[in-house]
Amino acid sequence: MEKDIFKGFKEYSVAEFFKKNRQMLGFSGKIRSLTTIVHEYVTNSLDACGEAGIHPEIEVWVDEIEKNEKYLVRVRDNGPGIPEKHLGKALGMMLAGTKFHRYVQQRGQQGIGAAGCTMYSLVTTGQPVKVVSKHGGVKLSCSLGIDFKANQPVLSERQVEECPPEEHGLDVEGVFGDTKYENSLQGVREYLKRTAIVNPHAAIIFNSPEKERMEYPKSVEELPERATEVKPHPLGIRPNDLLDLAGKVKGYTKLSALLQNEFTRVSLNKVKELQDLLPDVDLGMNPAKLSWGDAEKIVGAFGKVKWIAPATDSVIPIGKEQVEKSLRNILNPELVYVTGRPPKIYRGGIPFIVEVGIAYGGDIKSEGKGGVVMRFANRAPLLFDTGGCAITQTAKNVDWKRYEIKNFDEEPVAILVNVASVHIPYTSAGKQSIASEDDVVEEIRNAMMEAGRHVQKHLSGKRREREKSTKRKAIMRYVGQLSSDMAELAGNAEAEALKSRLTGMIEERFE
Ligand SMILES: Nc1ncnc2c1ncn2[C@@H]1O[C@H](COP(=O)(O)OP(=O)(O)OP(=O)(O)O)[C@@H](O)[C@H]1O
Ligand SMILES: [Mg+2]
């Protein structure tokens, strides 16, 4: 019997897995799939420029090949490009890249995005993507596909030329089926507009299938502060992370040395403390020998030791001024308030920061944008999976009535929330919504309430103004009559003089 069951036993590669489960990468629904493709390429461009210290200039084209079915997407940047040695794997191998193994705040973190797009092109149109990379004086043009069984890149039509070293960047183009372009809140156009809002240092151009050209020039000169790379904190990791590190990082013969050098806040004393808590695990063991059971015990002991919190300089916010400027530019509101809160820590070891900008009144209502929540993670817009996102849920749970916003969905109010972290707790590999980690939810909530209080101050000020002016008008209505009646009563008084004195008194009272 058993023999029959296991006849069909096979191994699969990660590429085959994602080919079957493409919705996990954001490829579900035609509109979303198209936005996902643009999102993956554009976030890569912004990350690459950020690392290379370049002002990003990104141009995006979406062309219709077959209406509501097949579109060509091209993204060109002026980043560092990719050297030939890494090009294939960067765009044609799942779980390969420069970010996954590092603790640094970037938009990408998994090493799947670009290869996921190559996969989508292959499975929906059978075509590889075309790539031109200029790097270090070499211009490499090629087509890239994936061998799904082996999760290996397939490079063809390779052409190499020299190019001036000052020319650099990546230009990727693919034809994608099962896609649809729509000018909606979840479409490419809105995606790029929101990207421009939170990346005022970047110049972004969008050429739409309707032959419209939208330009978002850079509006600030300074590049965002470079995020520093950090080491993981013991409280921020799980047993499989520890196993991963132990397997990947070479050059240690003792686990205790790896713990001290590859983690932050682990000193020799802390290692001793850990060893006392772990009588049956030898921290002097070779890291290659670490078993799941031991990793679990060690992570358990991490939770019992008192640690200094991790340094928080690894998280970089967009900044109060820039968010304020952006919100004023696009929404032309009556009031803008942006929080400037310090970083916090979730799961005890992962630093993050929450920025909330709130805009009220002005053009917001006239554009029919009442109650908008714009979500961002490390400056990348999140347009899908709204319901399951910690930001949306928290916004729903805040008692906005306390802040004089009676009906959030209908009032002229817009909120921008950016969560920045070395490790954003996404709910899935599609990276469109943030998981409800308690500490993150609490901080979003506090930041929203802080923003709410400012709106309340503004609105109650306005309300008091209104009440005063109604009262003043009501009293003023009687001044004329009152002064002539009093002048008559007094016999010789001048009605005009009385009127002006009374008016003066009222003005002073209701100033
Ligand atoms: N435009 C680009 N310029 C330079 N390097 C790039 C560019 N796009 C991708 N890369 C390189 O290719 C790697 C793989 O990109 P990919 O999008 O697959 O993964 P990632 O960005 O690391 O993580 P994620 O899956 O979260 O997007 C990146 O880590 C980066 O090293
Ligand atoms: Mg990426």
Image: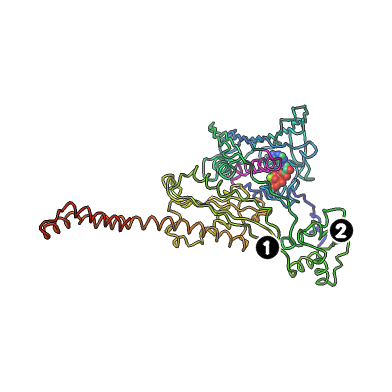
Residue 139 x %, y % = 75, 30
* Quadrant containing the C terminus in the rendered view: bottom left
Residue 141 x %, y % = 74, 31
The residue under label 1 is 347
Asked if residue 265 shows in the view, the reply is yes
The residue under label 2 is 288
**Magenta-drawn segment:** 28-54
Mark 1 to mark 2 CA distance (whole Å): 27 Å
Q: Is residue 176 left or right of residue 457?
A: right
Along the line of sight, the residue nearer the viewer: 338 or 412: 338
* Quadrant containing the N terminus in the rendered view: bottom right
Given the current orientation, which residue lies at the most extreme front position?
492
First of labels 1, 2 by sequence position: 2
- Foreground mark, 1 or 2, reads 1
Q: Say if disc 1 is inside 8 Å of ligand 1.
A: no
Q: Amino acid type of disc 2?
A: Ala
Residue 321 x %, y % = 55, 47
Along the line of sight, the residue nearer the viewer: 361 or 483: 483
* Residue drawn at 87 percent across, 67 percent down: 282
Asked if residue 19 shows in the view, the reply is no
343 in relation to 41, above or below: below
* Residue drawn at 80 percent across, 56 percent down: 262
Queried whether the magenta region covers residue 33, the answer comes back as yes
Residue 30 x %, y % = 58, 43
SS class, disc 1: loop
Main SS type for the magenta part? Answer: helix
* Residue drawn at 60 percent across, 34 percent down: 61
